[in-house]
Amino acid sequence: MQLDFKETCVEVLKAISPIVLVILLVEITLIGISLESLARFLAGSLMVALGFVFFLSGVKIGLLPMGEAIGSELPKSASLLLIIGIAFVFGFFATVAEPDVQVLSSMIDIASNGEIGRVMLLGTIGIGVGFFVAMAMIRIVLGVPIAYLLAAGYIAVITLAVWIPPTYLAISFDAGGVTTGPLTVPFILALGLGVSSVLGGRSRLSDGFGLIGLASIGPILGVMVMGVVVA
């Protein structure tokens, strides 16, 4: 466990250090930052790094093993409806708790002066992800080729893009991007790997992956449908 924690620290430092150095270089050479602002920036960067270290450690210690354990138990129930329901619930709540989704919904609420409400957008994105996570579980259990689901999803996206207002079109694709964050991705992948691991004669690589690509279609379609209904 100590070795994993050290490796996580090194990974976070490698990821954060370049952007911190670039910002420092720009602020010192071009902006002329004050000592107080510099100290606040360095303190904030340290807190971000520590937050990432503890978050990623928690994901590795608890979230990934638990997600895979749940996924491996679901097929044993022999109930497709139960698998669909649990996958939807996990997809929904993992997305609503995603920091990137929270930031996007808050910014859109501010930019639209409350016209596109934060709660409504969060719910729409969460339902979209939950629905496609459930579809992904069905794909794994029934052995449906992922190309079929991806093709159907993006045909629907292209079709709806013609009818919705430009504002909702832009928001929909941003919503699809922010769902692939550090909270949603590990759990959905672990859930898929768990389900595929207990199905005989199946490949964990071909069945357990591709879920994030499917899940990201959900928010795009959800916001598009919301745009059609609201507008």
Image: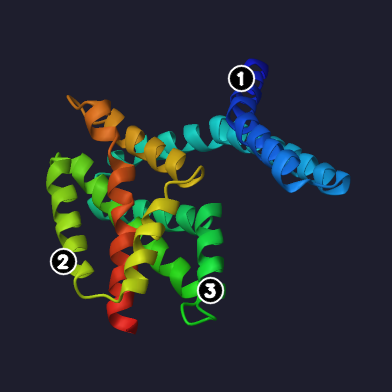
Q: Earlier in the sequence, mark 3 or mark 1?
A: 1
Q: Which disc, if any, is residue 111?
A: 3
Residue 100 pos. (x, y %): 52, 53
Q: Is residue 98 visible?
A: no
* Alpha-carbon span between mark 3 and mark 2: 27 Å
In the image, 19 versus 164, the foreground residue is: 19
Residue 27 pos. (x, y %): 72, 43
Q: Earlier in the sequence, mark 1 or mark 2?
A: 1
Disc number lying in front (3 or 1): 3
- Residue of label 1: 7
Q: Does residue 224 lie above or below 63 as drawn? A: below
Kindly identify the residue that appears in the image at 53 percent across and 81 percent down. Answer: 114
* Alpha-carbon span between mark 1 and mark 2: 46 Å
Kindly identify the residue that appears in the image at 65 percent across and 30 percent down. Answer: 17
- The three-letter amino acid code for the residue at tag 3 is Ala
Residue 53 pos. (x, y %): 65, 33
**Looking at the rendering, in which quadrant would you find the C terminus?**
bottom left
From the viewer's perspective, tell me whether residue 208 is left or right of residue 142. Answer: right
Few, some or many residues within 10 Å of mark 2 (<14, 14–19, 20+): few
- The three-letter amino acid code for the residue at tag 2 is Thr
Kindly identify the residue that appears in the image at 22 percent across and 48 percent down. Answer: 138
Q: Earlier in the sequence, mark 3 or mark 2?
A: 3
